[in-house]
Amino acid sequence: MEELFNEHRIFLENTDLVFKRYLMKVIPWQERLLGIQGFRGVGKTTLILQYIKENYANSDKALYVSLDNIYFADNKLVDFVKEFVANGGEHLFLDEVHKYKNWSVELKNIYDLHKNLRITFTASSLLEILNSKADLSRRAVVFFMQGLSFREYLNFSLNTKFKAYGLKQIIENHKQISSEILKEVKVLKCFKKYLSSGYYPFFKEGETLYYHKIRSIANMVVEIELPLLKNVEPSKIVKVKQLLYILALSAPFKPNITKLAERIEITRNTTIEYINYLADTKLINKIYANSKGISLLQKPDKIFLENSNLSFAFVGDKTDKGNLRESFFLNQLLQNHAVSYPKKGDFLVDEKYLFEIGGKNKNNKQISGIKNAYIASDDIEYGFKNKIPLWLFGFLY
């Protein structure tokens, strides 16, 4: 255990506190069993190391360990925790828990046995978390960490200190908020860059391999996690990839499931099943006209890639500007809001606000006469009346 504490201190020494993700202030760190899930590279490890550094410094009451550490190849987690608690440990931070066999069962037993111990864990495998919910039910509080919002991207890349705004604030005060932001940064140039390569924090490691890393993450999900955790036959993985590519070319996509199934030569129900799997892995987002009482075999009304960077990574210069706009808007809104597919307009938010997404010349024709209807318009710095700059919705978290 001494060696693990030494590694813990090295990690803390190399952790800076300049930029912090939005979840830092959202997460209830005092929970006894707290989970943070998200794609590889979104900042989960940095987040928990920053929390430790700020709240425990060099105290032995807290310890960060990664469960892919070779130590756990020959040592059980339950025995390690027993020793940690016996030596005065109070808060254990377990990184990449999905790499430890039967982790959810052991965490359940640890939770029940050590009443005064707090455990915060992270996982990059979203399907692994879903599969383990039965073991962790009523015990773990789990949060999903999205990639960088546009606000976070600006703060991370330019060292600005922009704060987040609520949706109502943006709707009611968008001109004033835009004015304050535009005093510090040329927004439209930065927004274009963000849509193509600013969602994952590892863009700072260099642009050359940025899309390669994104594709590697997606391949790991499709080629390894789906067969292992969803029992997708290895021979069918090519069908899942074909489906994902079609969705990437078409998203936002109003699916004709029968034609889609015929195109990739699988059944209708299997097509919907694969779409649900891709949504579970957060590679795509899907919305329905009615978000209540949705069955597993019900087709979504519209499908999007989870974020705009995925489009550039998957299909390159075949990306469509209109698709990028809608994917961005949905991605940023889903963090804190319920979004459904309306009869008119593009998105209905919280069953109250109707949004139409478009370019700078988009008018009110499609939402004319509708209460609480707005245009989220790209390529404009300032809004006017119910026309709000699209980029400003990147300040919601």
Image (cartoon, rainbow, N blue to C red):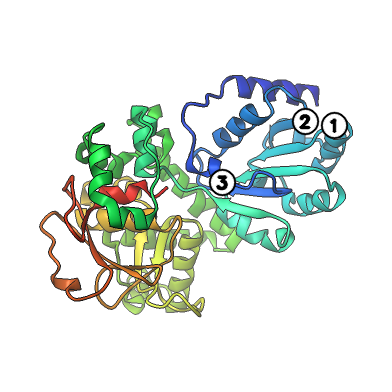
Between discs 1 and 2, the one toward the N terminus: 2
Q: Report x, y in % for residue 366.
A: 17, 72
> Is residue 396 left or right of 191 when viewed as pictured?
right
Q: Residue at label 2?
A: 61
Q: Secondary structure at mark 3?
A: loop
Disc on res. 354: none
| 316 or 179: nearer the viewer | 179
- CB within 8 Å, label 3 to label 2: no
Residue 370 locus on image (x, y percent): 23, 75
Name the element at disc 2.
loop
Q: Position of residue 30 (x, y in %)?
A: 69, 45
Instruction: Rate crowding at label 3 as few (under 14), some (14 to 19) or many (20 or more) other CA atoms within 10 Å.
Output: many
What is the count of numbered marks?
A: 3
Give the CA distance from mark 3 to mark 2: 26 Å
Measure the C-alpha gap from mark 1 to mark 3.
29 Å
The spot of residue 3 in percent (x, y) is 76, 22
Q: Quadrant of residue 70?
A: top right
Q: Which residue is situated farthest in the right direction here? A: 86
Type of amino acid under label 2? Lys
Residue 88 is tagged as 1
Under mark 3, the amino acid is Ser
Estimate how packed mark 1 is, as few (under 14), some (14 to 19) or many (20 or more) residues with alpha carbons within 10 Å.
Answer: few
Whichever of callouts 1 and 3 sits on the residue coming sooner in the sequence is 1
